[in-house]
């Protein structure tokens, strides 16, 4: 069930990020670039994807505040084209170093947490402020970009880790 208050949103975002960090414990560079056997996506790709979607949320929000056109999910793409869009995101981030992916994810998470700390419950769950939000309050968009993405990343990374057993020791 989706968070309905600022306090719940902060708690679930932090909880899911901590779970993701635990799953990432022990992931070295070699495992980080090992492709998932079903689709070829790596752990590094997965982190880069999550970073990108957090950045997208901030782009939507900042463009909305500035009165600029907002393209959701992205200019030239509709929601039913996410597979193609996400493939483009992977291509764009293919050369990102593993250490960069980890540090950028931590920075993106901090930015989300800071945003939630700076906005009250009404700002996050009150009336819809921007047309791009559709029927979702800002908090729901944050949850989709943060906690929900952390949860799905952790699940995916666990699958990859099971596919590439690590030596004991």
Image (spheres, rainbow, N blue to C red):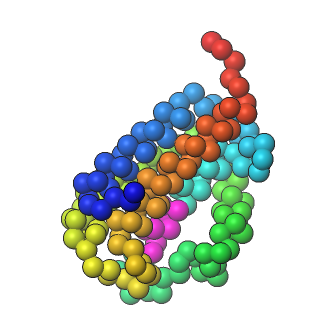
Let me know if residue 60 is in the magenta part: yes
- Residue 43, by quadrant, is top right
Placement of the N terminus among the 4 image quadrants: bottom left
Q: Decide if residue 35 is in sight here.
A: yes
- Residue 132 on image: x %, y %: 44, 81
Which of the pair 55/150 is nearer the observer?
150
Placement of the C terminus among the 4 image quadrants: top right
Which of the pair 28/131 is nearer the observer?
131
Left or right: residue 18 versus residue 114 is right
In the image, the segment drawn in magenta is 53-61
Let me know if residue 39 is in the magenta part: no
Q: Residue at x 41, y 85 (%)?
A: 131
Q: Residue at x 45, y 68 (%)?
A: 57
- Residue 127, by quadrant, is bottom left
- Residue 23 on image: x %, y %: 53, 35
Q: Residue at x 72, y 49 (%)?
A: 41
Which of the pair 67/147 is nearer the observer?
147
Eyeballing the image, is 76 above or below 139? Answer: below
Left or right: residue 100 versus residue 38 is left
The single residue placed furthest to the top in the displayed view is 169
Eyeballing the image, is 122 above or below 91? Answer: below
Taken as a whole, is the magenta stretch helix, strand or loop? helix
- Residue 30 on image: x %, y %: 71, 33
- Residue 112 on image: x %, y %: 37, 57
Q: Decide if residue 97 is in sight here.
A: no
């Amino acid at each position: 069930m989706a968070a309905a208050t600022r306090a719940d949103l902060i708690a679930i975002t932090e909880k899911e990020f901590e779970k993701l960090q635990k799953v990432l414990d022990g992931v070295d560079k070699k495992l980080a670039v090992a492709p998932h056997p079903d689709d070829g996506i790596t752990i590094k790709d997965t982190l880069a994807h999550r970073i990108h979607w957090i950045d997208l949320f901030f782009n939507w929000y900042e463009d909305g505040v500035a009165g600029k056109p907002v393209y959701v999910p992205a200019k030239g793409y509709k929601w039913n084209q996410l597979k193609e869009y996400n493939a483009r995101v992977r291509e764009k981030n293919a050369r990102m170093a593993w250490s960069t992916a980890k540090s950028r994810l931590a920075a993106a998470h901090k930015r989300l947490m800071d945003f939630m700390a700076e906005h009250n419950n009404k700002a996050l769950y009150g009336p819809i402020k921007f047309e791009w939000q559709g029927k979702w309050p800002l908090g729901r968009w944050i949850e989709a970009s943060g906690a929900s993405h952390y949860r799905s990343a952790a699940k995916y990374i666990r699958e990859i880790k099971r596919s590439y057993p690590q030596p004991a020791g």
